[in-house]
Amino acid sequence: MEVLNNLAFGFGHALTLNNLMYCAIGCFVGTLVGLLPGLGPLSTISLLLPLTYSIPLDGSLIMLSGIYYGAQYGDSVSAITMKIPHASSIVACIDGYAMTLKGKTGLALFAAGISSFIGGTVAIIVLSTLAVPLAEVAFLFGPSDYCALMLLGFVCVSYVTTGGSILSGLAMALVGVLLGQIGTDVTSGAQRFTFDLPFLADGVGLISIALGCFGIAEITKNLDIRNTFTPFSGKIDLIPTWPEFKRIIPSALRGSVIGSILGLLPGGGPTLAQFGAYAVEKKFSKYRSEIGQGAIEGVAGQAAADEAAARTSFIPLMSIGIPENAVMALMMAAFVVKGVQPGPNMISQHPDLFWGLVASMWIGNCFLLFLNVPMVKYWLSVFKIPYAALFPAILFFCCIGTFSVNNNLDDIYVTAVFGVLGYTFLRLGLEPAPLMLGFILGPMLEENFRRAMLISRGSFSVFVTRPISATLMVVIAVFFTWQIWSFVRDLRRPQLAAATANPEGVVP
């Protein structure tokens, strides 16, 4: 009953005319971003974050949230029709594009739209019921516990976002932590790593890193590979038969549960959820023999998991204050810029913001259902925009957005430097997402580490004597042990295969 009262309170704030407008704008822009090649929610949020400074607190966060889950909602369209995926729609290319080749594009798009609506609805229920208990549990955390939790987040996110190369992920996170130390030390007042440059006394701006490493770097990469995208011109019939509709629902419900769970985990989120849902469908679906060859279950399950994980990934951010991926790190920056610190006290200190944001997610779900099912035919015309005309406009808004933060031209130069660095990272196969997470969490990790050392009088035993931090440290140790074992196993596998093929050791 308390949850229903809280949701009613939230809908009272979300249903105001201004917040409805911001929600609709966020969903529209997010869907558009999901269709455009080379852009994603991370790049778009980083581009639009400076423009939200003049928008009221609740409206700006509702709009940015709408962009995020709107992009997750809409990126399946390009994956299904053109086989142009984003990170969260890779799995949609398998069965979705196979259905397009069979002339079932409309059925695949309908399945993705309805399944995303179901996944978002289930995730909102999870969000409204679990966020408050998790916030109460977070009050039990001390400085050493928060340090251990942040370290676990570094390990998990570095592993997931870099395709399993935990060494490169942790190296990028460390670079982000070092960048977060630039500026004036709050405790001593000493300037660190500023190279006697006055504009670095306040540190490197989050917007400069985000726009450079994600926005400008992605644009440069797309220009470098010189991809050309052909507009989709196939036939779209969105009305499924009743037997086809019945095949969608079970897969969507399974994907919703999987996405809701994986969205809660550090390092989880939509990218991981889509693969988990697809694996479950191949194992438990009645039509598992068809999956991979154009089965509707392969589209429905991943779409529901994708959208559910996009919603529940807000839970660790708003209840504990720990962003689980780079997009949530940008959302955390938006909260902080607006004077709100995500964490256990957020729900009690800003109940209108929290419950209004939760309620707006379901309102956005309804907007997105309308945008992505009956209007999908019109969205496909977006593919006709030449990228040569698109990227100068994006670069222009990057410069305007960076300059508008402090009205300082130096910020544009810093953004350009990080654009070059971001492109270099991409060419070297290094993901900038752990860097962003390290930049956000680095100062928080330093602050909590100092507190832990003061409380324990300089003893590191505080990390193993407190139950929460000790448990998290054990989890980190198990994760590293498993990584080392996997690395050794992969090294020995070719040797074992060679020994099996030539048991007597005869040299050919």
Image (spheres, rainbow, N blue to C red):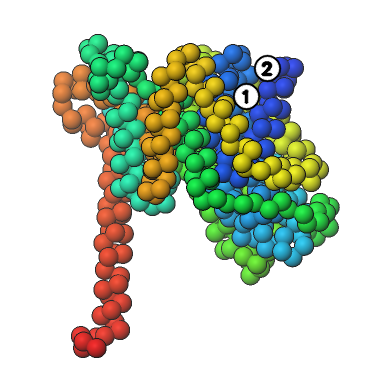
Quarter holding residue 284: bottom right
Amino acid type, mark 1: Ile
- Does residue 291 lie above or below 503 as drawn? above
Position of 308 relative to 414 (above/below)? below
Residue drawn at (27%, 75%), measured in percent from left and top?
A: 496
- N-term-proximal mark, 1 vs 2: 2
Going 75% across and 50% down the picture, which residue do you hit?
Answer: 110
- The numbered mark at residue 62 is 1
Asked if residue 253 lies left or right of residue 448, the reply is: right
- Image disc number at residue 13: 2
Q: Residue at x 54, y 31 (%)?
A: 395
Q: Quadrant for the N terminus, please.
A: top right
> Any mark on residue 180, and which?
none
Q: Which of the pair 290/93 is nearer the observer? A: 93
Give x and y (percent) for residue 275: 53, 54
Q: Is residue 116 left or right of residue 432?
A: right
Relative placement, left or right, of 13 versus 131 is right
Where in the figure is residue 327, as x and y percent of width and height? 50, 34
Q: Quadrant of the C terminus?
A: bottom left
**Number of numbered tags placed on the structure image:** 2
Q: Secondary structure at mark 2?
A: helix
Image point (21%, 87%), residue name? 507
